[in-house]
Structures are given as C-alpha cells and as structure tokens.
Amino acid sequence: MNIKNYVLVISILLSTVAFAQEKEESIKAISEEACDCIAKIDINTTKDVKSEEIKSCITTANMLYQMKQSLMGEVSKAVDSLINSKIDTLVIKGNEKNIITVDENYKEIEEFLYDNCSAMKAVYFTDNSEYDNSFSDRKKAIKFYNTGQIAFQKEEYEMAIVMFRKAVKKDKKFAFAWDNLGYSYRKIGNYKEAITSYKKSLELDPKGKMPLMNIAVAYQLDGDNKNAIKAYQKYEELYSDDPEGFYGLGRIYYLEKNYKPALENMIQAYLLYVEMNSSYNIDAQKHISFIYNELKEKGELKMFNEIAKKYNLTVNDED
C-alpha cells in the first residue's frame, strides 16, 4: 500500500444531510439509473474492475440526468415562448451556460446506492474465482447446479437448497455447489448448515475466497464471534490486499467495543477501499467516525490519534 495522507471529516460523516426535496429526487433518480447499470456488471471480474465499472455507472447516470434536465429546461422555455407569441415555428438552441458536472452530488449518490441498491452489494461482494474443484464435469451435477442458480435468483431459497444438495450428491467435489448451498442456507437463517457447507468447500480448496468470507459471516450471524474472528484473520493472511477481511474484523471488534483492533482493521479497510475507488469506503468511514466519537466521549482520543497517525490519517473534527 502506498503511503499517502488521508483526511477524514468526522462531522460530515455523522450528520444527516438535509437535502432539499428537488435534490433528494434527483439523487434517487440518478441512483435508480445507476443501479440498473450496476446490475449488468459481470460478477466474475476482479474487484478493481468492478469498482471502476460501478464508478462509471454512477458518473454516466449522473451526466445523463443533468443533460436531460438541461434539455427539459430549454424545451420548457421554448414552449413558453411559443405560447406567448404568434409564431408557429421555433428553433431550440442549446444554452452555453448549462454545465454538466461529472461528480455533482457523487458522494450522496454513492451513499444512496450503498443503502438502497442490492445489486451493488451483490456485484461487489461476489467472488467466483475459479479453482481446480470449482466446477463439475458431471452433466447431472451441472444441471442441478444451474437449476439451483435460477431458483436462488428468484429468491426461492428452499428450492435452491434442494437443487444444490442434488448437485453435491452427484459430485461431492463440486466446490461452487457447496458454496451456493451454504449461501442458500444463510438466506433462510440456517447458519449451522451454512457453516457445514462452507467447511465442505474449504476442504476442497482451503484458499477459496467465497467460502472463507462467507463462513466468517455465518459464524458471526450464529453468534460465534470467536470463530468468525479466526475466519476473518485467515482471510486477511491469504488476501492482505483485499479490504473485506479487515472490514469484517473491524466490525466485530467494534461491536464488542474492543476499540484498538477495531480501529486498526477499519482504517486498513478504508484505505484499501479508497485505493480501489470502491464505494464501500463509505461504511468503513462511518465505523471510524463511530469509534472516534465513542472514544471522544470516554476521553480516550489519544489512542485514536496514535493509530490514525500510524496510517497517515488526519481527522478534522468539525463540531
């Protein structure tokens, strides 16, 4: 990771921005357009590519919205002129004063998408990196797996479980089927079966990104923070350039009010997200600000400042 200076403004992160109604509507409209674009991103690309494509979807939707609003404004003026005059023909010329700002309200749009666009999380957090046992060469296993995928996309999780179980019965070394079986169990709240499925996948490939990350999440959802921490630490060891392990650890430690490791991990997650141009730096920022304010209330900001300085993170506390 390159040594850079980063500035975090705490008050901005914690305050709820009082948008005017017009601004709220524009952010919502742009976000809906961007979300449709994000849903079309190939989930099999790298996280760096996904981050760039998410950014492209946001900026494109933003520019198109501004262009549309600009054109509508010109048309409205033209219609008024037509109504108030006796002419029956009118030429609409562009207004040179209309400026399209690529990053206008970018942060707010990004935050709206983070909270409201399920496709964004699905795209970014899916990792289908292929390994030796990822797929099956058995036709029936593949058929059951594909049927399970369709059921899962329709949110028919019980049916997906049936199909994925049939797939792994036909081929016990079908890692992706075990992964998706675990994910389906997680969706219905059966975390213990989800953990069992992820363990089966990890037996086939101990370095599998998807089962490593998801078993940590399943442990946490099942209330087993001890094993969740171990799983995230394993993920960190194998994928030190991926923010997800750091974020997961930071979040657990924060919930346990273990501030020092929470802050260490969350800052590392934040810096990696920023380097990747990932929208998910937003949530890391929020957690850093939560830690800051809780330590401030306790009069323990010395520790925060020491850790922030270690990572060249400057905090501007604007009360």
Image (cartoon, rainbow, N blue to C red):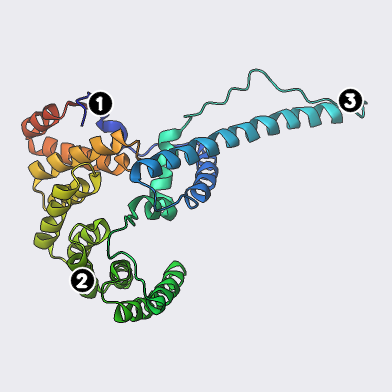
Give the camera-side residue of 23 and 147: 147
Disc 2 marks a residue whose amino acid type is Lys
Q: Secondary structure at mark 2?
A: helix
Give the camera-side residue of 120 and 298: 120
Locate the N terminus by quadrant: top left
Q: Give me the residue at 34% from left, 66% from top.
A: 135
Give the camera-side residue of 111 and 246: 246
Residue 162 x %, y %: 36, 81
Disc 3 marks a residue whose amino acid type is Ser
Q: Is residue 236 visible?
A: yes
Q: Secondary structure at mark 3?
A: loop
Q: Give me the residue at 12% from left, 52% from top.
A: 233
Spatial distance from mark 2 to mark 3, Cα to Cα?
77 Å
Query: Is the residue 249 above or below the residue 143 in the image?
Result: above
Spatial distance from mark 3 to mark 1, Cα to Cα?
56 Å
- Tell me the residue that label 3 is attached to: 85
Rate crowding at label 1 as few (under 14), some (14 to 19) or many (20 or more) other CA atoms within 10 Å.
few
Q: Nearer the viewer, mark 3 or mark 1?
A: 1
Disc 1 marks a residue whose amino acid type is Val
Of mark 2 and mark 1, the one earlier in the sequence is 1
Of mark 2 and mark 3, the one earlier in the sequence is 3
Give the camera-side residue of 269 and 285: 269
- Tell me the residue that label 2 is attached to: 200
Q: Give me the residue at 46% from left, 49% from top.
A: 41
72 displayed left or right of 107:
right
- Tell me the residue that label 1 is attached to: 7
Residue 69 x %, y %: 64, 34
